[in-house]
């Protein structure tokens, strides 16, 4: 496993995304992923699966210290007291004393960013989160956040895959020592039918999804692909035994455009 270093954090380059994984399936996938070598799991309060993620962690038998666990605070809990309460609820569900990374899930313009980031840094000082960061922040919001956040942020988790150009966000993260963590890294499964990526993969005996994930980690980006199928778990981490050429990296980057975004919940910030 490779790691992405960011403001004191060491983030395993591939993590298991768990959005929409529920109940027994979620616990079993987390358990199996950790047995197969995953060391990073991404959940969120709003996914309503933190208990099952915690169950999977314990069932895997992997030491707690070896696993990087991320959860996120939902936007309705951004007032300082709510944020602390919500974090404690997440930890109770996960049955963990602390998470490795605690993120603000989406920007919430109704509450001043300085207050929410102050509260986030406070729960970090309380020992409830080793590291803190944000998600779905535009470049403008990152710039605002680094000024008002009392502690270093380690990442911006945003949508990123070959169909979406995120050069500006990646550049802002790098400038501030933060990692970009890519969500929907295989474009919600659309990559599986990509003939160009499959073509590149033939040379390395890799699938289109593996080429796509390799393209991300080769940019020093962390990625959190989700699968509900045990047999795909291995596929999505077997990326560290081949390297894309500079030409292939550029070729894949050229597929991206500003219009390639797949996630828009209707309350998204104005992306620049
Ligand atoms: N911060 C945020 O606002 C935010 C937003 C969205 C997502 N996320 C996080 O990012 C994670 C990943 O994003 P995502 O779930 O939207 O999408 P994703 O990981 O890009 O794609 C998931 C889809 O790809 C399919 N898939 C997985 N591995 C595959 C493979 N090797 N070959 C072909 N198809 C494959 C899965 O189907 P099967 O289940 O059938 O394998 C599933 O339909 C989430 O689970 C969540 O943890 C965060």
Image (cartoon, grey):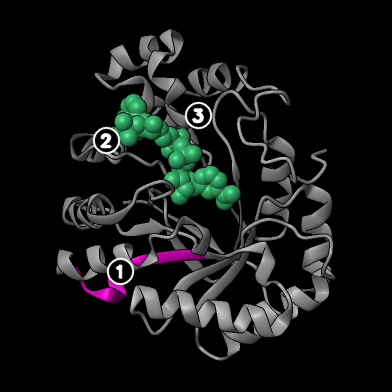
The answer to whether residue 70 shows anywhere in this view is yes
Q: Is the residue 247 above or below the residue 47 in the image?
A: above
Q: Residue at x 68, y 66 (%)?
A: 76
Label 3: which residue? Answer: 187
Q: Nearer the viewer, residue 88 or 248?
A: 88
- Frontmost of labels 1 and 2 is 1
Rendered position, 94 above or below 155: below
Does residue 181 appear anywhere in the picture?
Answer: no
Which quadrant is the C terminus positioned in? top right
Q: Give the residue furthest to the bottom.
A: 126
Which quarter of the figure has residue 217?
top left
Instruction: Give above or below for 143 relative to 203.
Output: below
The residue tagged 1 is 54
Residue toward you, 172 or 95: 95
Foreground mark, 3 or 1?
1
Marker disc for residue 161: none
Q: Nearer the viewer, residue 36 or 9?
A: 36
Q: Position of residue 79 (x, y in %)?
A: 74, 77
Does residue 70 show up magenta in the picture?
yes
Q: Is residue 52 left or right of residue 69?
A: left
Q: Which residues are magenta?
A: 62-71
Residue count near mark 1 (Cα–Cα under 10 Å), binned few <14, some 14–19, many ≥20 = many
Can you give x and y, in whole percent of width and height, for residue 150 in the image? 74, 80
Observer-side mark, 3 or 2, equals 3
* Residues at marks 1 and 2, CA–CA distance in whole angstroms: 30 Å
Q: Residues at badges 3 and 2 in contact (C-beta under 8 Å)?
A: no
Give the residue pinned by disc 2. 241
């Amino acid at each position: 496993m490779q790691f992405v270093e960011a403001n004191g954090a060491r983030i395993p380059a591939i993590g298991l995304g768990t959005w929409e994984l529920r109940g027994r399936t979620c616990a079993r996938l987390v358990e199996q992923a950790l047995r197969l070598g995953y060391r990073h799991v991404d959940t969120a309060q709003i996914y309503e699966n933190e208990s099952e993620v915690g169950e999977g962690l314990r069932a895997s038998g992997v030491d707690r210290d070896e696993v990087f666990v991320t959860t996120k605070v939902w936007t309705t809990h951004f007032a300082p007291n709510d944020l602390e309460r919500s974090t404690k609820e997440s930890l109770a569900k996960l049955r963990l004393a602390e998470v490795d990374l605690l993120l603000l899930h989406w920007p919430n313009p109704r509450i001043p960013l300085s207050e929410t980031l102050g509260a986030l840094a406070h729960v970090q000082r309380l020992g409830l989160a080793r590291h803190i960061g944000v998600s779905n922040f535009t470049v403008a919001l990152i710039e605002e956040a680094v000024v008002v956040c009392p502690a270093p942020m380690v990442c911006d988790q945003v949508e990123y895959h070959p169909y979406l150009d995120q050069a500006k966000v990646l550049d802002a993260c790098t400038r501030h020592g933060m990692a970009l963590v890519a969500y929907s890294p295989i474009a919600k499964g659309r990559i599986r039918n990509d003939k160009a990526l499959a073509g590149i993969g033939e040379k390395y005996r890799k699938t289109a999804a593996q080429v796509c994930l390799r393209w991300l980690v080769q940019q020093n980006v962390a990625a959190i692909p989700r699968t509900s199928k045990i047999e795909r778990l291995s596929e999505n981490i077997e990326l560290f035994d081949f390297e894309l050429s500079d030409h292939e990296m550029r070729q894949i980057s050229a597929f991206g455009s500003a219009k390639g975004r797949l996630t828009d919940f209707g309350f998204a910030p104005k992306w620049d």
